[in-house]
Image (tube, rainbow, N blue to C red):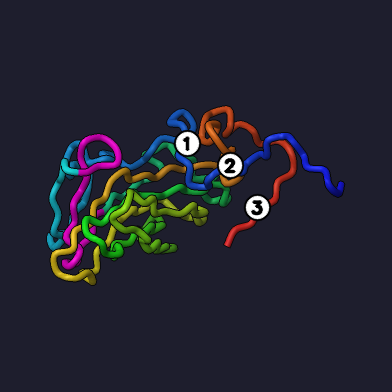
Amino acid sequence: IADHAESRRPRDGGDPLAKVHTTVAPNLIANSIFESGLNDWNVSTTLSQSITESSSFAGTRALSIDTDVSGTLSQTIDLAAQGIDLATVDASLLDVLASIRLRTVSETASTLRMEVLFRGADTSTIEEVVVDAAASNDRWYRVGQRLPIPAGTRSIVFQVVSDGAATEGTIELVDDAYLAVVADQYAPESGYRAGVADDHEVVSGPRLYLRS
């Protein structure tokens, strides 16, 4: 109706990357804030890295990476081992929320990127998604994406990649890695309700999803 606005709080208007409560979907990344150093992470031999306590987003530590050297940091998530129903995966009814916090030490743009690889039972890659970092040194940036899990996926590789493209001596910080599996119909509320259990359970009524 012209000149009249609905006063009720809109539903499902929150950040699509908002973390969900652990009772809804746990973070499947182990040692996600590097409090245990590099335990649980697969680190390529070429990656120039160290644990720092000078700056962190969550906890007291972060990972410092020299990005003028190439290398990767990754974890592989076995969906069945994590209790994810494979029939629901194969029905294309699940999404993954994947993100990480990045910050550069100097006034340079980030050259790190986050990659999510969906692999089949034979470990072949079904789909690979690359998310370039748009980060600098003024704050911690969240880099991530919400992605549909392709049918046939049996494991997900979450990795941070340095291709060595930065100028010599460039240091970037990594923290707060996150990967959670949610129903494809889930959309977070705006404000404080985003990601809580009650928010996740609100699924009644018609919905329209626009995805690129």
Of marks 1 and 3, which one's residue comes earlier in the chain?
1
Amino acid bearing label 2: Tyr
Instruction: Name the quadrant containing residue 73.
Output: bottom left
Residue at disc 2, secondary structure: loop
Residue 124 picture location, percent across and down: 37, 62
Q: Look at label 1 and name its amino acid.
A: Val
Q: Residue at x 70, y 51 (%)?
A: 208
* Relative to 199, residue 116 above or below: below
Task: Let me know if residue 165 is in the magenta part.
Answer: no
User: Furthest-right residue in view?
Assistant: 1
Q: Which mark is residue 186?
A: 2
Inter-mark Cα distance, 1 to 3: 19 Å
Residue 60 belongs to the span the image colors magenta: yes
Please tell me how crowded label 1 is: few (under 14), some (14-19), or many (20+) other residues with Cα within 10 Å: many
Report which quarter residue 81 is drawn in: top left
Q: Are marks 2 and 3 in contact (CB under 8 Å)?
A: no
Q: Please name the residue that numbered disc 3 is placed on.
A: 209
